[in-house]
Image (cartoon, rainbow, N blue to C red):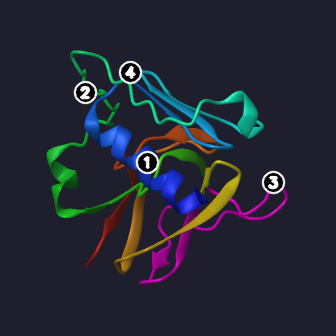
């Protein structure tokens, strides 16, 4: 199972509302637990002799949809475009601790500009803008965990 398949599995579990999913394969054991406060993904690689040759998926009998914490957006913000997280991970505004921010409030951006980095399973994914405009607000603190589809930025497209 490659990293892309694991990321897709995490996205699927987040959307499904299951509180826990376990997947066991030859040399890989994955447990994904979701809760209202945080998402936890545990990946263990163990020798094949220790794991039975079966796949186990164990969602709870009554799935509970995760309740993402979304910032309150006033009616004045309705004219802005919201840029959302495409993956679950840790949000970073800088490429490295000693580097400057990718973007700042008030800065004009174009399509394809890197806005932030989201770390998922030790992979740093650059998040690029799909719109042009001016950054109005950053909705997430640096080094904070983010969920799939969580609002990250407000952009004024005018």
SS label for mark 1: helix
Q: Is mark 3 on a helix, strand or loop?
A: loop
- Position of 5 compared to 98: left or right? left
**Disc nearest the viewer among 1 and 2:** 1
Question: Is residue 121 positioned above or below 63 on the image?
Answer: below
Q: Distance between the residues labelled 3 and 4?
A: 29 Å
Place of residue 100 in the rendered image (x, y in percent of width and height, measured from the top left) = 74, 65
Between disc 2 and disc 3, the foreground one is 2
Q: What residue would you read off at disc 4? A: 36
Type of secondary structure dominating the magenta stretch: loop
State the residue position of label 1: 9
Which residue matches tag 3? Answer: 97
Q: Can residue 153 be seen in this view?
A: yes
Quickly name the residue at label 2.
Answer: 65
Q: Is residue 2 highlighted in magenta?
A: no
Residue 137: which quarter of the image?
A: bottom left
Residue 88, image x, y percentages = 48, 46
- Magenta-tinted stretch: 93-116
Residue at the spot 60% in from the left edge and 60% down from the top edge: 2
Packing grade of label 4 (10 A; few <14, some 14-19, many >=20) is few
Quadrant of the drawing holding the C terminus: bottom left
The residue nearer to you, when weighing 46 against 12, is 46
Residue located farthest toward the top when viewing the structure as drawn = 61
Give the spatial CA distance, label 2 vs label 4: 9 Å
Rendered location of residue 91, percent (x, y): 58, 49
């Amino acid at each position: 199972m490659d990293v892309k398949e694991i990321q897709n599995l995490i996205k699927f579990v987040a959307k499904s509302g299951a509180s826990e999913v376990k997947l066991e394969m030859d040399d890989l054991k994955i447990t994904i637990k979701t809760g209202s406060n945080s998402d936890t993904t545990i990946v263990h690689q163990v020798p094949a002799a220790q794991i039975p040759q079966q796949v186990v998926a164990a969602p709870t009998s009554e799935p509970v949809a995760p309740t993402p914490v979304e910032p309150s957006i006033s009616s004045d913000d309705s004219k802005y475009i919201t840029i959302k997280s495409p993956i679950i991970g840790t949000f970073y505004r800088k490429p490295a601790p000693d580097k400057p921010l990718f973007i700042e409030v008030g800065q004009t951006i174009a399509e394809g500009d890197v806005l932030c980095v989201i770390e998922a399973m030790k992979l740093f994914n650059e998040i690029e803008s799909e719109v042009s405009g001016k950054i109005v607000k950053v909705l997430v603190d640096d080094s904070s965990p983010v969920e799939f589809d969580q609002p990250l930025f407000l952009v004024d497209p005018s």
